[in-house]
Image (cartoon, coloured by chain):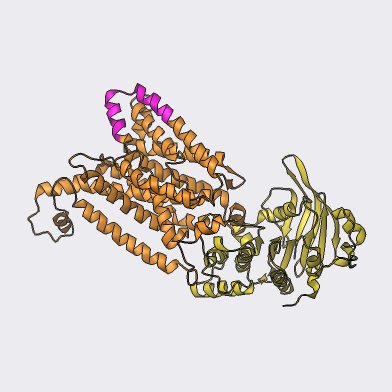
Chain colours: A orange, B yellow
Amino acid sequence: MLMRTATTGLRAPLADGDRAVLARIVICCLAATLAVTAILSLGWGASDASAFEVVMHWVGLGDGTLAPRDRLIVETIRLPRVTLGGLVGAGLAVAGAILQGLFRNPLADPALIGVTAGAGLCAVSMIVLGGTVLAAVAGLLGIYALPVAAFIGGLAASFALYRIATRRGQTSVATMLLAGIALTAFANAIMGVLIFIASDAQLRDLIFWGLGSLAGATTTKVMATAPIILVSLAATPFLARSLNALALGEAAANHLGIPVQRMKSVALVCVAALTGASVAVSGGIGFVGIVVPHLLRLVIGPDHRYLLPASALLGGTFLIAADAISRTVVAPAELPIGIITALVGAPFFIWVLLRRRGLIDL
Amino acid sequence: MNVRAHDISVRLAGRLILCGIDFTARAGEVTIIIGPNGSGKTTLMRALTGELACSGNVSINGRWLRHYRHADLAALRAVLPQETTLAFPFTVREIVQMGISSASHAAGGRRARERIDEALSRVDLAGFAGRFYQELSGGERQRVQLARVLCQIWEPQIAGKPRWLFLDEPVSSLDIRHQIAIMDIARDYAAAGGGVIAVMHDLNLSVMYADAIVAISGGQIAAAGPPADVLTEALLSDVFGCALKPGQTPADRMFVLPHSARI
């Protein structure tokens, strides 16, 4: 009975149960929204630089009156920041959607279950030890050192969590969330040790990074992150059908011809890459991975063939918008973007919990 | 063409659940596995479908199970689980569609839609496509899953080779009318050249629909063959641990015979 009240109420039965057309329309709208948000955000900031003239200049329609100052501000400060916001938002939202499909649970999120902390630990290690113990690795990887380190940390955390929380294809929500808390606490403890031994310059880097902010966005950071996130996003369509089948349970997915074990490994690598690359450049930005896929499931349903691309688009839009707010609401100072996503996300998470109280077995 | 089990043994948590099972299910027949609770019926089913690692071998259509690729096996046999719960709000159509898109010859949009509607009306759920799976009753969910499984291996034969329907207690949560309807589907599937292997609890339904019955007790086969040979008083009493007389009305008891039902 609880189950019924939990799932009805919001949705009436659909005419014929086919949401593919609706999903395609929503995806087109989301793509348009992302483009508009990005362009608006380019023009929004502490200075009055006009993005319109810069964009006109890019497409060759400029009238020659473009001020060099405006161009500098838009191209070297706002553009990397908006791009990074889009990439990180897309990465975190899709990582959340994949994790939820994998754990068969809408409450999984990279930040909640310790993947972000694992990635963060390795990123901090790279910042603090990159000049000494890990110098060889840092030199070899160049600008990719931080994202790759975060990827490895995220991967280790996701596999550890999966092994702990899942037995015979069944994931216990309680174990998953509690193991996430333990993993996060453990990672934070080691991070504390690292911060203790960090030099003053490194400390500044760490604090900046730890606040969860896109403020440090540079073209170099975009170049370091974009390939990892884009390649992972490009791989996700191949996971969509498997994640759908997995909703029926691991055995049923196997019977439907899905190579479940292999697919789970690929999915976890994708999640770690998306989370790791995002964490490396922006610190821990929470709740994007829960809020975005959940909202979309209410509108277009849980079919991952549409949910994954839609999550990427809405996640990007959400973070670009949140970042625009974060850098203007207390201008000329900046609010860390993690604060805004948490302000939106934490109450949302509670709401999801309450709605599903009858469904989950905590 | 058949499904054969060669000397299957399964050990779970140190306990021997199945011990040296040998049996053959032929295409064109409904083979029903019966036995008391804990006798290893479901374990045998999971071994036959490759869900569970076991010692011994299983072959389908003359080829070892482990030599099939995932997708080839999925095009050859489908499995109806006892119960399926979902974490996400899929509609009935979306669930049934998973059976179609997994088939190797993925049907195009319009044909797929028609196939889904046809499968749903076959399990007496016409008009349910737009409902949310999580809001259905247990019996309705079971029939949605059957529609999905049917879509996966729609034609009972492909290139002259039989396809196989594995049903794990397909009618346990259904009312009598739908029990009959579902078992009719199974019988039709076998009659058209496919193979059906089902685990059942209801002995009357088993007698009605089985071409062959395999009785399991304590992880071993107690008897296998045509219903009339297997369901003897001695064997039933021995396997189920209580006195059972096939074909005799118990005195002073009211009972309902599915044999009399017609839809």
Q: Is residue A17 found left or right of A167 in the rendered image?
A: left
Looking at the picture, how far across and down is residue B246, in whole percent? 89, 65
Q: Residue at x 14, y 61 (%)?
A: A61
Q: Quadrant of the C terminus of chain A?
A: top right
Visible residue check, residue A98: no
Q: Is residue B89 above or below residue A167?
A: below
Q: Residue at x 47, y 56 (%)?
A: A238
Looking at the picture, how far across and down is residue A135, in whole percent? 35, 27
Look at the image and say whether residue B239 sits in the magenta stretch: no
Q: How many marks?
A: 0
Toward the viewer: B200 or A35? B200
Q: Residue at x 39, y 26 (%)?
A: A192
Q: Is residue B242 found left or right of B179 in the rendered image?
A: right
Looking at the picture, how far across and down is residue B238, in whole percent? 89, 54
Q: Is residue A283 above or below residue B6?
A: above
Toward the viewer: B203 or B48? B203
Residue lying farthest to the front in this orientation: B252
Looking at the picture, how far across and down is residue A87, in whole percent? 33, 49
Visible residue check, residue B162: yes
**Quadrant of the image occupied by residue B119:** bottom right
Q: Which residues are magenta?
A: A188-208
Look at the image and say whether residue A195 sits in the magenta stretch: yes
Q: Is residue A8 found left or right of B218 in the rendered image?
A: left
- Most prominent secondary structure in the magenta stretch? helix
Q: Quadrant of the N terminus of chain A?
A: bottom right
Residue lying farthest to the left in this orientation: A65
Q: Residue at x 31, y 38 (%)?
A: A143
